[in-house]
């Protein structure tokens, strides 16, 4: 196994650090998904920020071009990351930890933004080679006329749980009862998208727009307080909020109606790039993707290695190891960190598009795009080869991880 602690790593300068949740570093938390979820308003602020972000990207990227690299030097990729949360340390810091195995580096070209839409715009202006954020960030960029494609899955699923007050509701199918008060976000809200994805996969046959007794609550802390006070009967809470509610009301007073990671395939974070860059740098893109997925395999295989990465790259350090352990356990249980490129399937993409249209995030005509219109399948296949083939969760649990084929 590769020891993340013994590697020499260069920290990216100018990279934002830190947005952590209450209680310290909360690795796969609601806030990370909402960072990607700030894409929730159609084209919000994207075009208006073009000029500003072009200047920011140029200042960060300097005069060097991404890619290239010869005589044994690593290929440098300029990455505009769509979150500053510690949740993405295993993925965004992968080139610094494992990049030498694949000839990949971000050098000093990792830019981190608080919203996926901002990262998307930096790619659009040409000041980064690769962007990352929610799948819908990329699709919205496509709607503005940019020719971009996804070439790697980096995280999937969410720690959100749909929680009900047991005295009112005990199964998700009861959510259509007009007497059941459901907390939602305003139109186009990210958590509405998650709920709609669950409704689709559980064959409930509705969207949040069909619910007749709703209360708009935009923040997890507000939803938690409303559930505790009995002001709503159903709400989406993250891994820790639902535990707080059980502590407040008692285990029997709370029913888990759905674990989103169990009921829906959700692409919470992907890598994308312009198609002309991918055509010219397919091998570089494949090795970059392989680096990220190899990091996912290693981090999921070894808790100590994962913890060491947090200790090195987190702005706050580890303030509560119980939180770190809980997040790592959840990531392993639901395979939140993809081990293979094959999690990007036509079925998953079709569901993402349908629900994004139903939620009002993208236009109906965009929802008719096909799998290969949105995904660079050639790069996916090459990345899987560089990884030395597919692995299963059992392989990762036992540390049976192939050596890179790079």
Image (cartoon, rainbow, N blue to C red):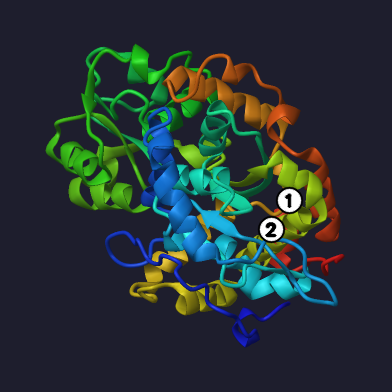
Q: Nearer the viewer, residue 347 or 45?
A: 45
Q: CA distance from mark 2 to mark 1?
A: 7 Å
Query: Which sits earlier in the primary sequence, circle 2 or circle 1?
Result: 2
Q: Is residue 135 left or right of residue 286?
A: left
- Nearer the observer, 164 or 199: 199
**Do the residues under discs 2 and 1 have CB atoms within 8 angstroms?**
yes
Q: Is residue 69 left or right of residue 209?
A: right
Asked if residue 391 is positioned above or below residue 318 in the image, the reply reads above
Percent position (x, y) of residue 221?
A: 22, 46
Please state the horizontal and vertical placement of residue 22, each as a whole percent of the image: 27, 61
- Residue to which mark 1 is pinned: 340
Residue 389 picture location, percent across and down: 85, 55
Q: Which mark is residue 93?
A: none
At horizontal 60% and vertical 66% (from top left) the residue drawn is: 63
Seen at 77% across and 73% down, the residue is 101
**Relative to 262, is 301 on the left or the right?**
right
Q: Nearer the viewer, residue 316 or 30?
A: 316
- In x, y percent, where is residue 146? 60, 33
User: Can the viewer see residue 342 in this picture?
Assistant: no
Q: Residue at x 77, y 54 (%)?
A: 286
**Residue beneath disc 2:** 293
Q: Is residue 69 above or below residue 45?
A: below
Judged from the image, the secondary structure of the residue bearing numbered disc 2 is helix
């Amino acid at each position: 196994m590769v020891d993340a602690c013994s590697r020499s790593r260069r920290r990216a300068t100018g990279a934002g650090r830190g947005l952590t949740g209450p209680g310290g570093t909360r690795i796969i938390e609601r806030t990370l998904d909402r960072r990607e979820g700030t894409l929730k308003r159609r084209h919000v602020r994207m075009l208006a920020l073009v000029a500003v972000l072009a200047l920011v990207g140029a200042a960060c990227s300097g005069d060097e071009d991404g890619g290239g690299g010869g005589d044994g030097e690593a290929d440098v990729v300029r990455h505009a990351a769509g979150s500053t949360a510690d949740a993405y340390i295993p993925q965004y810091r992968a080139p610094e930890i494992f990049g030498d195995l694949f000839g990949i580096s971000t050098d000093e070209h990792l830019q981190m933004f608080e919203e996926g839409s901002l990262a998307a715009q930096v790619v659009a202006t040409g000041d980064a080679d690769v962007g990352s954020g929610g799948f819908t960030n990329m699709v919205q960029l496509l709607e503005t006329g940019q020719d971009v494609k996804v070439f790697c899955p980096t995280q999937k699923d969410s720690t959100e749980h749909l929680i009900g007050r047991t005295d009112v509701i005990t199964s998700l199918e009861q959510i259509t009862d007009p007497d059941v008060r459901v907390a939602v976000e305003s139109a186009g809200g990210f958590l509405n998208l998650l709920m709609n994805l669950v409704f689709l996969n559980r064959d409930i046959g509705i969207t949040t727009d069909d619910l007749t007794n709703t209360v708009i609550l935009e923040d997890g802390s507000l939803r938690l307080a409303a559930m505790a006070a009995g002001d709503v009967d159903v709400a989406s809470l993250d891994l820790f909020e639902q535990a707080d509610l059980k502590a407040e009301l008692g285990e029997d007073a709370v029913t888990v109606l759905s674990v989103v990671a169990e009921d829906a395939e959700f692409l919470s974070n992907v890598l994308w790039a312009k198609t002309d860059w991918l055509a010219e740098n397919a091998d570089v893109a494949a090795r970059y993707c392989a680096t990220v997925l190899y990091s996912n395999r290693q981090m999921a295989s070894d808790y100590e290695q994962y913890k060491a990465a947090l200790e090195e790259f987190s702005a706050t350090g580890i303030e509560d190891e119980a939180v770190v352990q809980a997040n790592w356990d959840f990531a392993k249980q639901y395979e939140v960190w993809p081990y293979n490129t094959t999690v990007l399937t036509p079925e998953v993409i079709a569901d993402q598009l349908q629900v994004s249209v139903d939620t009002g995030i993208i236009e109906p005509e965009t929802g008719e795009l096909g799998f290969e219109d949105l995904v660079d399948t050639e790069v996916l296949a090459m990345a899987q080869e560089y990884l030395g083939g597919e692995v299963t969760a059992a392989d990762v649990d036992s540390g049976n991880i192939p050596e890179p084929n790079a």
